[in-house]
C-alpha cells in the first residue's frame, strides 16, 4: 500500500521520542507508516520500533482476515486511537490485552469495535491504561457475542465514572472477574450496570480495591435473584469497602 493512499485513513497518535514501540504484534498488520515511510512488507512478526519518532501521527492498517488482535499494542506509547482502526477486521474474535499497558492512552472512540460483531473476549483489553478518564457508553454496543470481560479496565486509575448502559448489549457475558480491579478513582456504580447480563457466573473481584467508592447500589445484582448482602460482599471483591451496606 502506498503512503499517499494510506494517509487517507485516520492516524494513531503516539508520544514522540527515541526507541518508540509502534506495535507489539506486527503479524497482524499489512501496513505501518511512520514519519512518511512504510516500515513493513506484511511478513514481519513481533514488535516494531523506530529509533526516533518525529511525527506523532502513525498510520496502521490490519490484514483483512485477522481474527486475533490480542496484545496488538501491548505496552505502546499511543495516546489516541482512530475510530476506524478495526473497521476492516469483521472476523476478529479476540481483543485480549490489545491495549494492555498503554499508560498514555487518554480516551477511547465510541465506535472502536462497531465493526467487530464476532468478538467473544475483551479480556485484559485496557488493563493498566492509567490515563484513561472515561469509557464511552456504546463502546460494546455492537458486540453481542462477548462472554468475557475479565480485567478489561483493571488498573485504569484515572477512571471516575461508568456509564449505565456500558454492558447493555452483551447478553452472553458469563465473566466479569476483576473487570474494574484497582480503579482507585472510581466514585460510583450505576445501579443497572448488569441488568442485561443474566448469564454471568462470576463477579469475583469486579470492583476490588476501588477505594474511592462511596456506595454500592442496592439492586446492582438484581437480575441474579438477590440483593447485595454484607456476608456475600467478599464474593464481589469489595474487600476495602467501609461504607453502609444494603441488607435483605
Image: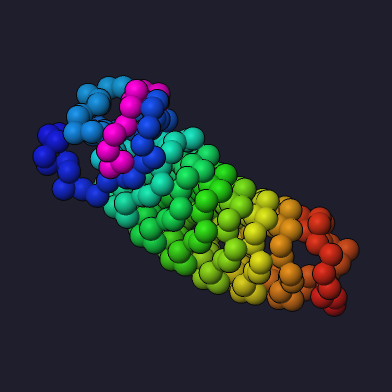
Q: Which residues are magenta?
A: 45-57
Along the viewing direction, whichever of 21 and 63 lies nearer the viewer = 21
Residue for point 41% across, 47% down: 79
Q: Is residue 53 magenta?
A: yes
- Can you see residue 115? no
Quadrant, the C terminus: bottom right
Q: Is residue 138 shown above or below 82?
A: below
Q: Is residue 141 left or right of residue 59?
A: right
Along the viewing direction, whichever of 1 and 182 lies nearer the viewer = 182
Residue for point 14% across, 36% down: 3
Which quarter of the figure has residue 237? bottom right
Which quarter of the figure has residue 242? bottom right
Q: Is residue 195 shown above or below 124?
A: below
**Percent from the top left, x then y, of residue 124?**
55, 44
Residue for point 49% across, 61% down: 135
Residue for point 34% across, 45% down: 13
Amino acid at each position: 500500500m502506498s503512503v499517499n493512499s494510506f494517509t487517507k485513513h485516520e492516524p494513531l497518535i503516539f508520544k514522540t521520542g527515541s526507541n518508540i514501540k509502534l506495535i507489539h504484534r506486527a503479524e497482524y498488520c499489512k501496513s505501518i507508516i511512520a514519519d512518511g515511510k512504510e516500515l513493513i512488507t506484511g511478513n514481519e512478526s513481533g514488535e516494531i520500533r523506530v529509533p526516533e519518532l518525529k511525527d506523532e501521527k502513525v498510520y496502521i492498517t490490519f490484514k483483512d482476515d485477522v481474527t486475533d488482535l490480542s496484545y496488538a499494542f501491548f505496552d505502546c506509547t499511543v495516546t489516541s486511537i482512530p475510530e476506524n482502526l478495526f473497521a476492516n477486521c469483521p472476523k476478529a474474535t479476540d481483543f485480549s490485552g490489545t491495549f494492555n499497558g498503554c499508560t498514555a492512552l487518554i480516551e477511547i472512540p465510541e465506535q472502536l469495535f462497531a465493526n467487530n460483531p464476532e468478538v467473544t473476549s475483551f479480556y485484559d483489553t485496557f488493563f493498566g491504561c492509567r490515563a484513561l478518564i472515561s469509557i464511552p457508553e456504546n463502546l460494546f454496543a455492537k458486540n453481542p457475542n462477548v462472554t468475557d470481560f475479565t480485567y478489561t479496565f483493571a488498573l485504569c486509575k484515572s477512571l471516575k465514572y461508568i456509564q449505565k448502559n456500558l454492558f447493555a448489549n452483551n447478553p452472553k457475558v458469563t465473566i466479569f472477574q476483576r473487570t474494574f480491579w484497582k480503579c482507585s478513582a472510581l466514585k460510583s456504580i450505576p445501579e443497572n450496570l448488569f441488568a442485561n447480563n443474566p448469564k454471568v457466573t462470576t463477579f469475583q473481584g469486579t470492583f476490588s480495591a476501588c477505594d474511592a467508592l462511596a456506595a454500592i447500589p442496592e439492586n446492582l445484582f438484581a437480575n441474579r435473584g438477590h440483593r447485595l448482602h454484607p456476608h456475600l460482599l467478599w464474593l464481589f471483591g469489595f474487600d476495602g469497602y467501609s461504607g453502609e451496606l444494603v441488607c435483605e
